[in-house]
Structure formats: structure tokens, C-alpha cells
Image: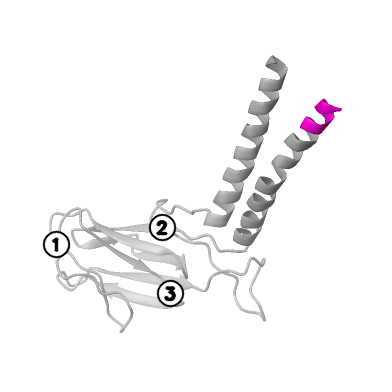
Amino acid sequence: MQAQRRRFRLIFSFVPAVAIALFLGLSGVAAEQTANVGVQMGDNFFNPASTTVNVGDTVTWTNVGNRPHDVTSTDGGPLNSPRRIMNGGTYSYTATTAGTYQYECTIHPGMDGTLVVQAASTGGTGGTGGASPNLPRTGGGGMAAPTLSPGLTLALLGIVGAAGGAGVIARRRRAA
């Protein structure tokens, strides 16, 4: 009878942890994954010259050249970096509004690029009402790094922790 009670307590001691982990995970599943995308600024070039991201993604321009550069919208868009970003310096922009933004380095004529920001996907398999489906992120030449939502991360950690705790207790019971 005592062994049965202990087993019952052991099993139900992990139920709250698992329930919390699942709740947090499910609340985070609907959240969009965001990406960090890199663009290199070299001497007279942006690489890639055209970048496609979703609303919520962050684009970081890094100066890999020997001369200073900047990132400035040519069409009244939101890109407006400091004037002289030196070698190794960066400028980041988190996309908030869908659209196509042309930009340039105002220091070096002819050094220009395009940022395409598309509306965050709704998880469907295509567009709505005949609209074009979301394009894939082009990223920065393979530098895009999708991240898990915080809720999903917590859920996975909770499940792993609960399973690990159950394993430790089971080992102790076998050893006793």
C-alpha cells in the first residue's frame, strides 16, 4: 500500500510541470518565427544586393570593406543608418511594415540595394483571394538564423526537465 502511494505521488508530482510546459508551448506555437538576416557592405557593393524578409525579421548590415558606408532609403523608406559605418561596424533594422525599400550608400554613388519586406505568413499554403503566396526569405547568403518562439523553447525545456527528473527518481528507486 505504501509503495502504491509513493508511485501515485511520484506520477502526479510531474503533472503540473508537464501541464505548464504544454500550455507555454501551445501558446508559443502560433507565434511567427523570426529570422536574423545579414547583408555585407563591401567597397562599392551590398551582398546580397536584394534581400527578402518577413515582417518581424531583423536585417543587419555589416561593413566588411575598407571604406566607411551607410544604409539610407532612397524612396522615403525606414532605412537610415549612421552616416559613416566603419569596417566591422553594423546597422540593424527590424522590419515592421510590408513593402519594397530601395536603399543606397550615400557616400558611394551606384552602391545600392533592395529590401523586400513581406507580410508575415499566416501558416497557410498559399495566398488568399488570389494573392501571391509568400516568397521564401532570401536571407543574407545563408546567414538567416530562424529562432524558436520563447513559449516553445520553455515548453521543450519543461518536458526535458520533467523527463530527466522522472529518470533520476526511477534510478534512485532501483538502487534502493
Residue 120 rendering spot, x and y as whole percentages: 54, 70
Label 2 and label 1: CA atoms lie apart by 23 Å
Can residue 6 be seen here? The reply is yes
Q: SS at mark 1?
A: loop
Which colour assignment does the render follow?
one colour
Q: Amino acid at mark 1?
A: Pro
Tell me the number on the disc at residue 36: 2
Q: Which residues are magenta?
A: 1-6
Q: SS at mark 2?
A: strand
Could you tell whether 22 is left or right of 154 in the image? right
Q: Amino acid at mark 3?
A: Thr
Residue depicted at 37% across the width and 66% down the height: 50
- Eyeballing the image, is 16 above or below 51? above
> Camera-side residue: 17 or 67?
17
Query: What residue is pinned by disc 1?
Result: 68
Residue depicted at 62% across the width and 63% down the height: 30
Please, which residue is most extreme toward the top here? Answer: 175
> Camera-side residue: 137 or 92?
92
